[in-house]
Image: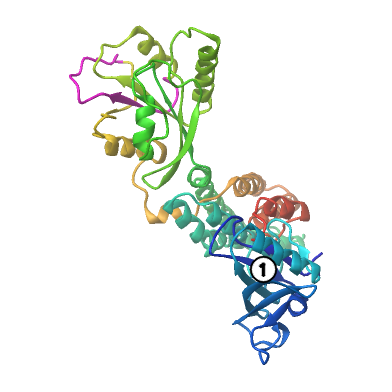
């Protein structure tokens, strides 16, 4: 399959000014020659055109005009995949893009699989595996901070840090294997101490990378924040304020919200999925009972709870019960209707960040956003925090490397056979190599690249 010439629509499907069909592979120029005619008779065919040049012309299929296009010729290795590449910019819209794409397939290309262009970039040495994953993170980024973190990974910051770990482990393994070649010589205490120091440095570096897992998960997946409280305390109004537009129906009639409403929001640069829920109370009918059940279920699964209370009314016994019930979750207590005289007194046991807001006037919403950020990120987001943010795959590999490195260090401390230490260090090196793709299997590559969109 690596020898195939592949093609895909590289822009989102739908109406737009233009669409781009990407062709990559050794036969890319021949495919383009079969379906493209330059606008000028003296114009070069794609296979004859200089690299990185753009040509006006027409795509034809079986003698019929398909579309007027701009065709870009890019010769290897100065391309995304390091293969001969052609990109055809045609008119936007579902039908024009589809017709040009079908013409390209009829001319000899194969439809690309998800992520196949980036997979070829990896296999051809243009990107390592961590950088390839960063391409998908850039595409899926929902906030400026998520985009900045993905761009740092694409620039190779994570790969560099992983390389330092790998280098430390490799030096220790090389020394141990050299010692194994001369079994008659005992390992000097000074040498053993030096090797242990290097392993400790590697363990510290692995630990520092593992410490970024939470930030990585937050920036890639976002935090699920459930807005809950009794009916008519202003939950839907709070959702609308945090989103900056009216998403949920607001009504003085209790029980307006019967189901959960989920909406992504950008709060101080962090991706947060806000979940508006049905009011917590003794349900009067089956539908409301289901709504309350879903509220409780959402709260159980939430990363953060925004518990909304009516500051203009005394504390209701049900409020006190729910404050205690959800006390074990990270939460912010939101005292709504702060534009009215306050009559609410919180119980001493209600430990959480507390913010007074008015969903009617918008007062206090900025402070609430700061509280949400501090609760999920714990302080200001600094640029250096975004340089390395590992994902779940990296976390799994680093944990395996950490365990194997600790075992190897224990072997050295107990002065046991160096063969056991060498075996564990090879396990650690293989695990670390998976992150950048040095020791990646075909199954691992399939898992990574099938998450990509087609055309990338």
Judged from the image, the secondary structure of the residue bearing numbered disc 1 is strand
Task: Tell me the residue that label 1 is attached to.
Answer: 22
The percent position of residue 396, horizontal first and vertical second, equals 63, 45
* Foreground of the two, 54 or 18: 18
Residue 55 in view, yes or no: yes
Is residue 160 covered in magenta? no
In the displayed structure, does residue 48 sit left or right of residue 333?
right
Percent coordinates x, y for residue 344 in the rendering: 24, 15
**83 w.r.t. 181: above or below:** below
**Quarter of the rendering occupied by the C terminus:** bottom right
Q: Residues within 10 Å of mark 1 (few under 14, many from 20)?
A: many
Front residue of this view, candidates 446 and 427:
446
Q: Position of residue 269 (x, y in %)?
A: 39, 48
Q: Is residue 347 magenta?
A: yes
Residue that protrudes farthest toward the left in the picture:
341
Measured as percent of width and height from the top left, residue 135 is found at 58, 59
Residue 197 in sight in this render: no
Q: On the picture, is 41 further left or further right than 379?
A: right
What segment is highlighted magenta in the picture? Answer: 327-348
Residue at x-position 71% and y-position 64% = 99
């Amino acid at each position: 399959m690596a020898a195939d010439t592949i093609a895909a629509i590289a822009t989102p499907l739908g109406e737009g000014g233009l669409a781009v069909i990407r062709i990559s592979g050794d036969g890319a120029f021949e495919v383009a020659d079969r379906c493209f005619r330059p606008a000028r008779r003296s114009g070069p065919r794609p296979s004859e055109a200089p690299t990185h040049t753009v040509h006006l012309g027409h795509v034809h299929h079986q003698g019929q005009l398909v579309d007027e296009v701009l065709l870009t010729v890019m010769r290897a290795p100065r391309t995304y995949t390091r293969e001969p590449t052609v990109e055809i910019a045609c008119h936007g819209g579902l039908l024009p893009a589809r017709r040009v794409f079908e013409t390209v397939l009829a001319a000899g290309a194969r439809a690309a699989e998800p992520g196949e262009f980036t997979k070829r970039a990896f296999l051809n040495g243009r990107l390592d595996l961590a950088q390839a994953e960063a391409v998908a993170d850039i595409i899926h980024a929902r906030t400026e901070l998520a985009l900045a973190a993905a761009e740092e990974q694409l620039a190779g910051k994570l790969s560099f840090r992983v390389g330092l770990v790998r280098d430390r482990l490799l030096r220790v393994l090389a020394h141990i294997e050299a010692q194994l070649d001369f079994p008659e010589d005992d390992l000097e205490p000074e040498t053993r101490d030096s090797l242990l120091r290097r392993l400790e440095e590697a363990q510290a570096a692995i630990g520092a990378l593992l410490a970024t897992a939470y930030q990585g998960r937050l920036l890639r997946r976002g935090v699920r924040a459930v807005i809950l409280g009794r009916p008519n305390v202003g939950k839907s109004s709070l959702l609308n304020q945090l989103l900056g537009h009216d998403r949920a129906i607001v009504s003085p009639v209790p029980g307006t919200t019967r189901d959960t409403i989920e909406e992504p929001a950008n709060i101080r640069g962090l991706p947060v999925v806000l979940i508006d829920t049905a009011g917590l109370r003794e349900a009067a009918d089956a539908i409301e009972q289901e709504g309350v059940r879903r509220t409780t279920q959402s709260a159980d699964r939430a990363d953060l709870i925004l518990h909304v209370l009516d500051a203009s009314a005394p504390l209701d016994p049900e409020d006190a019960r729910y404050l205690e019930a959800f006390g074990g979750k990270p939460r912010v207590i939101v005292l709504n209707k702060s534009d009215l005289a306050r009559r609410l007194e919180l119980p001493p046991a209600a430990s959480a960040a507390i913010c007074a807001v008015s969903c009617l006037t918008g007062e206090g919403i900025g402070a609430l956003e700061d509280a949400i950020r501090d609760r999920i990120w714990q302080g200001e987001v600094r640029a250096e925090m975004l340089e390395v943010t590992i994902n779940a795959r990296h976390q799994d590999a680093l944990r395996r490397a950490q365990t194997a490195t600790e075992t190897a260090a224990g072997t050295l401390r107990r002065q046991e056979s160096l063969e056991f230490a060498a075996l564990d260090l090879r396990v650690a090196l293989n695990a670390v190599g998976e992150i950048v793709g040095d020791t990646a299997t075909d199954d691992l590559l399939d898992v990574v690249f099938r998450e990509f969109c087609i055309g990338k």
